[in-house]
Amino acid sequence: MLRQYELVDRVLDYDPDADEALLNRAYVFSMQAHGSQKRASGDPYFSHPIEVAGILTDLRLDAETIATAILHDTIEDTLTTPEEIARLFGDSVARLVDGVTKLSKIEAQTESERAAENLRKFLLAMSDDIRVLLVKLADRLHNMRTLHHIANPEKRRRIAKETMDIYAPLAERIGMYEFMKEMQSLAFEQLEPEAYESVTRRLEQLKDGGGNKIAKIASGLNLLLGRAGVDADVSGREKHPYSIWRKMAERHISFEQLSDVMAFRAIVPTVQDCYRALGIIHRRWPMVPGRFKDYISTPKRNGYRSLHTSVIHADNARIEIQIRTADMHAEAEFGLAAHWAYKENKVRADTQHSWIADLVEILDTAGSPEELLEHTRMAMYQDRIFAFTPKGELIQLPKGATPIDFAYAVHTDLGEQSVGAKINGRVMPLSTVIENGDQVQILRSKGQTPQAAWLNFATTGKALAAIRRHLRHKERVELTALGRKLYDDIVHRLPAVIGTDAMNHALQRLGLVDEAQLMMAIARRTLSDATVMEALMPGSAGADVAGTVPQSHAISIRGLTPGVAFDLAECCHPVPGERIVGLRRPDAGIEVHAIDCAVLAELAERGDDEADWVDVDWGDKADGAVARIAVQVKNEPGSLGVVSSIIGAHKINIIALRLDTRDTQFHTNMIDLEVHDIHQLMRLIAALRAADAVNSAERA
């Protein structure tokens, strides 16, 4: 175990300005707080946090992180409180210690690969400061190094599996490959002891039989690159046991058939030297097809950069070679942790990840610890949130997702039957935005079907696609039924009874595929009654094959040629007093839209060249128009009566009222109103929002 002065000296060696007093106070406090507690090995429990701190000094981390490592178990395993940590060591260290404590309390869900992947992302998303994760990984690494002291074999296997499923991949995700490899090897030894012993024994035999083969190859590579003018530091090693065993399992081959058990690394001064070295090596030995990877031009998502190649060396032995610069190597070994290191304040400007670049830049320019921490938020999953089912399953969703997205993510049937949701035990509307870590229970009813209003707050592609698919099917069924009724009326108006072939002839004349397409065209009014009559019985429509008669308006619009027909758009229901614009399309009249109408925004974004914009304004006769509002009320007796009373009190007439969506707690009603102007409408909406029975009121 590191002594107090040894630990402090380690930090001061790479950071002479470190807070020495903070480290000394943390060391003494942790030793006193843990007191006589013992580990499974029989060592004082206090030795564990000190060793974790020692691991982090190898990463050259700042004094606050080292102090956090020393104190990381005090809140969970002693009587120490977060308030005490904050008072003695400052808010920053207290926040870090609290973060590590919370991560320690998360129960690993390792029943499946998907659950493990979600939990890794959850760990990332829930960590405000990357240093919390670094302490947690160092904590797990030391626990794995001492795992053999635990007597219970099942407990050892559980911890090893958790490490293999969660923490080793997490270390890989943030680029800490040395942590990952050691964790995997230690876990492999516990999970597959026979395989581990077999692979390590074969490696020892290879090493004994080959003498100093690795050293000879490394020396030859150094000489080859040096003669070509590339200053390189080449080192070699056998691949670690778990990596070898995994390749044997994946390729279904024996150890003897595995040819690339040796790996070499060439560290060169510059990126240009990386590619020069690659060319020199490929000219000397044939490359193994399909084994070249350029992670410099296309880094991995965790920022890892290097050139990888495999060549056929002497005696047909395949060897793997990695080529990188010293900066790339530092990041490859320790990932994000490398950016916390105090290495002459160098900032690498060519990083491919802007959030890493920001972190590195702020290390050099931060004026205070607060400013530093403000820029070290973990951004890898900042656009994702994670919510739990009542059974504890983790569901990953985009930010802004609602219970509808959650329900469809669990199962399509659950999504389609959703009527409400309980979020953290409280009943909430389906439009509620889910927060990170929420527990969501979907309330369902077999009589429920997807509602068009869900499209306004669903965010995931799966939910939106399923809702639209259902609505299209529902619309098709309803339109076909409506078209059938209108068709029967058309046939009834024909001057004579038609035969069974009339329908087929009509479809041919109209260019339609089948009867259902005709019924939908009739329902949508894309075919007039007279056109259908003429198709069924030529000559029957006579003079009725005329166009529609322009609708007269009691409202006048300034900016249009007198007598020109126009319609107030159904999509936005413009009201006198608000800004409007006219829209003329080919083969259609003029539609008058509110200036902020979503349809106009979509046309502008699409760049529709066929749409003709007309500058218009309300004329002298502009008193009264139809407005549509969406009012969400509580599912309680009298709620709709309250809404009607408020509307009546404002001297506004209700033209139409339609129930849009309903669940166990809330109903949303679409209400068409006859209002004088925009000001009267906004006064009404404000009054509705103030009512206790009303959850929300908006223009629709």
Image (cartoon, grey):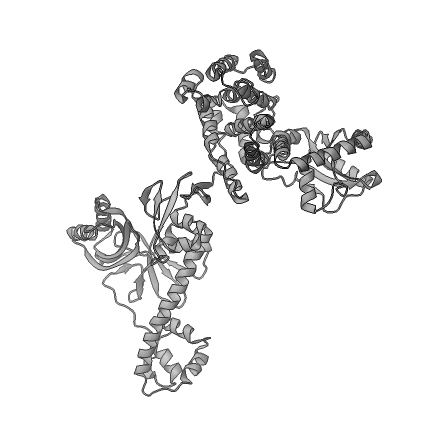
Quarter of the image for residue 219 reads: top right
In the depicted structure, whether residue 658 falls above or below residue 502? above
In the depicted structure, whether residue 369 falls above or below residue 196? above
Is any atom of residue 513 visible in this view? yes
**Percent x, y for residue 32?**
47, 14
**Percent x, y for residue 573?**
29, 57
- Report the front residue among 334 and 44: 44
In the depicted structure, whether residue 651 falls above or below residue 207? below
Please tell me which residue is depicted at 73% across the width and 33% down the height of the picture.
201
Please tell me which residue is depicted at 20% across the width and 51% down the height of the picture.
637
As drawn, is 39 to the left or to the right of 484? Answer: right
Placement of the N terminus among the 4 image quadrants = top right
Please tell me which residue is depicted at 80% across the width and 40% down the height of the picture.
317
**Percent x, y for residue 108?**
50, 36
**Percent x, y for residue 520?**
39, 71
Is any atom of residue 223 visible in this view? no
In the rendered image, the residue lying farthest to the right is: 315
As drawn, is 686 to the left or to the right of 256? Answer: left
